[in-house]
Amino acid sequence: MIKRAAELRHASETALRGGEGTVEMLHLVEKDEASDLGRTFAFICIPPGASIGYHQHVGEMEIYHIIKGCATVKDDDTMDQLQPGDSMVCYDGHYHSIANNSDEPLEFLALVLYTRSS
């Protein structure tokens, strides 16, 4: 399957998972295209001052890979900074959030994979 840029679905989410501001997402693979292995593979842009709120993953895991900008992440009870090239994994049953506290857009890939029947 080949998907051209013009075929990818763009979405804007305000207060995503209880976060601040509006997050832009470009869905690279849709849930129905993922062979029941996951539900999200997306390029995400968080503008300065915006975030995706603290949330739990149940029956799935999520991977973030930072492409551009600086991310402030909460991984369960640990706060940290991620730079381009850094990744984080939120495993099944755990919590995380991501925020852009810088003056530049934060760009990253997000992949949500199922860990058991959901």
Image (cartoon, rainbow, N blue to C red):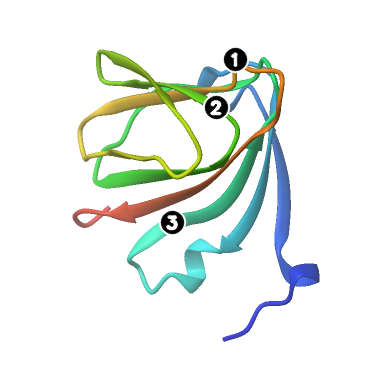
How much space separates mark 3 and mark 1, taking CA atoms?
Answer: 27 Å
Q: Which mark is residue 29?
A: none
Image quadrant in which the N terminus is located: bottom right
Q: Residue at x 29, y 45 (%)?
A: 61
Amino acid type, label 2? Cys
Q: Residue at x 39, y 50 (%)?
A: 112
Q: Which quarter of the figure has residue 97?
A: top left
Looking at the rendered structure, the secondary structure element under dot 1 is: loop
**Image coordinates for residue 25, horizontal then vertical, percent:** 66, 45
**Image coordinates for residue 76, horizontal then vertical, percent:** 25, 20
Q: Which mark is residue 39?
A: 3
Amino acid type, label 3? Arg
Farthest-out residue, bottom: 1
| 3 or 2: tag closer to the N-terminus | 3
**Image coordinates for residue 64, horizontal then vertical, percent:** 42, 42
Position of residue 90 in the picture relative to residue 82 (left or right): left
Comparing 52 with 84, the one in front is 84
Identify residue for label 2: 70
59 shown above or below 21: below
Q: Which quarter of the figure has residue 92?
A: top left
Q: Residue at x 53, y 18 (%)?
A: 18
How much space separates mark 1 and mark 2, taking CA atoms?
Answer: 8 Å
Q: Residue at x 49, y 69 (%)?
A: 32
Q: Residues within 10 Å of mark 2 (few under 14, many from 20)?
A: many
Find out whether the residues at labels 3 and 2 contact each other: C-beta distance under 8 Å: no
Find out whether the residues at labels 1 and 2 contact each other: C-beta distance under 8 Å: yes
Q: Residues within 10 Å of mark 3 (few under 14, many from 20)?
A: some
Position of residue 48 in the picture relative to residue 6 (left or right): left
Identify residue for label 1: 101
Amino acid type, label 1? Asn
| 1 or 2: tag closer to the N-terminus | 2
